[in-house]
Image (cartoon, rainbow, N blue to C red):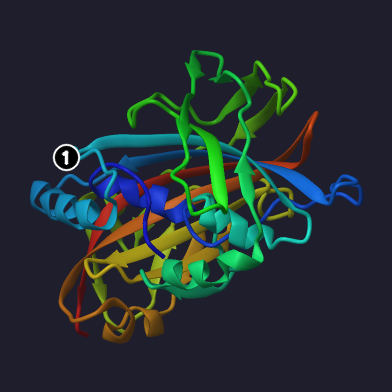
Amino acid sequence: MRPNGALSIACLVLAGAALVGCSAPVAGDDAADASGVVTQGVVRVERAINLSRDDAWTTSAVELDEAALPSAAVERSGSVTNVSAKFMRLSSAADSELAERVVGSPFDLPSAGSCMVLSPADDETATSSLSSLGPIELLDAGDVTMKTDSAAMPLAARAFPDVGDLVFGVFYTSRDATSDLPAPARYVFESSGSGLLDRFSFEADAPAGPEEVRVGDADLADGVELDAGVGAVVQWRADEGAEDGRSRDVIYVDVTSTRGAAVRCAFKDTGRGVIPGSLLDPSTLGPLPAIATLAVHRTRQVPFSASGIDLGEVRFDLSVVGRARIAAH
């Protein structure tokens, strides 16, 4: 994984969503048109809240996140937000997960109850298969606006940096990293349309962000101490529908070292999960003792339908972020 977000300690959330796409939107049987191409829409809504009360830890986080996240807008505390929308036209035979990674909208999440180790080298391996994708066009959708009950946010259209003749076109992002993104809330996405895409309007409900997060006996806001090789118990306020299978949400926890290596564990939204001690180890996180960023995310994936878009998904990723010291046990 190579994090792609913004804001000192809190921006690791944006890294959380910016990984290889193991969860691409699911196409229907008639998704590809007669010309053998498919149009896929991916909208990401991300918010990270920095809980750290320790200025020294926050300063260290600035150094970490600026190195790992080149686009970071550095602050000592508070929140960072990001909204992006990409509407891709590509061959129906192309690997949609690889395509998402190439255009910067991937999503890598282990199954609930399991973990994975991520490293900065992961991104580089994907580019070796670019030629197998064929051309990817990022479609102009006209003026794109995101609305909540409290505000309307016009998204900025930006030219995608050309990747040879393979990727070209326009994508949309929020204009700054401090926009107010309420949660839970209903979001409405609208476009004026263009010669390439019909105008659209669709909505999706965001979950609440994680609350009452503790690691062991410590509040995440106070910073936590982890022992290498010892499992870490993470607790949060659970989704009421998780126990009976009604929850649409997944909780995942990232522990990211200053070397860029990260451990990611995913859990059902039941209020408790354990990071295995075998992953809190120098072999995964580097030399100890070490300071790491610990981020707890709640994510929700909401399919959407719109004229001219064969398959679409809104991905909400809401997180709280603190600091962890990892010491040899």
The amino acid on which the numbered mark 1 sits, given as a three-letter code, is Arg
Q: Which of 216 and 100 is in front in this view?
A: 100
Q: Which residue is drawn at 23% across and 46% down?
A: 8
Q: Indicate the quadrant where residue 258 lies.
A: bottom left
Q: Is residue 1 rendered to the left or right of residue 257?
A: right
Residue 238 visible in this rendered orientation of the protein: no
Q: Residue 325, percent across and down?
A: 20, 67
In the rendered view of the protein, which quadrant contains the C terminus? bottom left
Q: Which of 108 and 110 is in front in this view?
A: 108
Q: Residue 265, percent across and down?
A: 48, 68
Q: Residue 109, percent across and down?
A: 56, 63
Q: Nearer the viewer, residue 13 or 216?
A: 13
235 vs 120: above or below: above
Residue 261 visible in this rendered orientation of the protein: yes
Other residues around mark 1 within 10 Å, as few (<14) / some (14–19) / many (≥20): many
In the rendered view of the protein, which quadrant contains the N terminus? bottom left
Q: Is residue 184 rendered to the left or right of residue 34?
A: left
Q: How many labels does the image show?
A: 1
Q: Indicate the quadrant where residue 185 lies.
A: top right
Q: Is residue 26 rendered to the left or right of residue 154?
A: right
Q: Residue at x 21, y 38 (%)?
A: 77
Farthest residue in the front direction? 165
Q: Residue at x 64, y 53 (%)?
A: 135
173 vs 268: above or below: above
Q: Which residue is drawn at 60% across and 25% down?
A: 187
Q: Name the residue under label 1.
A: 76
Q: Indicate the quadrant where residue 287 lies.
A: bottom left
